[in-house]
Image (tube, helix red, strand yellow):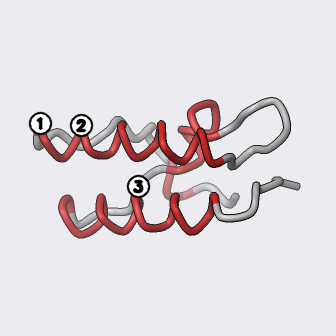
Amino acid sequence: MFSAEPGAMAMIEASMEKYSRHFEQEFPLYVYLRVTQNEKYNFSIEGALRLAAVIDRAIAENVAVYVPEGYHDRLY
């Protein structure tokens, strides 16, 4: 089970939507759990800000993030 700090998921979802609009593909969120977590939550506010920076950089460089082979075939 994943835990989310209040407000973090809305921020994460907004960043993921921005990524999806730009690259026309889904952002591989579960690959980036280490980015979004803190000591208390899997999805934290500070992690959401870090994730936004990752996504903004990918968009600025126009380079999609790495997606492991079979990622979209797995169930999460």
Q: Position of residue 16 (x, y in %)?
A: 41, 61
Neighbor class of circle 1 (other Cα within 10 Å; few <14, some 14-19, many 20+) is few
- The mark lying in front, picked from 2 and 3, is 2
- Tell me the distance, in whole angstroms, between the alpha carbons under discs 2 and 3: 14 Å
Q: Tags 3 and 1 in contact by the CB under 8 Å rule? A: no
* Amino acid at circle 1: Glu
Residue in front for this viewpoint, 24 or 68: 24
Q: Position of residue 34 (x, y in %)?
A: 63, 31
Label 2 sits on a secondary structure element that is helix
Lower sequence index among marks 3 and 1: 3
Q: In the drawing, does residue 27 fall left or right of residue 73?
A: left
Q: Position of residue 75 (x, y in %)?
A: 67, 60
Residue denoted by label 3: 27
Lower sequence index among marks 2 and 3: 3
Q: Tags 1 and 2 in contact by the CB under 8 Å rule? A: yes
- The mark lying in front, picked from 3 and 1, is 1
Q: Quadrant of the C terminus?
A: bottom right
Looking at the image, which residue is at 49% across and 57% down?
72
* Amino acid at circle 3: Phe
Q: Position of residue 47 (x, y in %)?
A: 59, 40
Neighbor class of circle 2 (other Cα within 10 Å; few <14, some 14-19, many 20+) is some
Residue denoted by label 2: 57
Q: Is 17 situated above or below 5?
A: below
- Tell me the distance, in whole angstroms, between the alpha carbons under discs 1 and 2: 6 Å
Residue denoted by label 1: 61
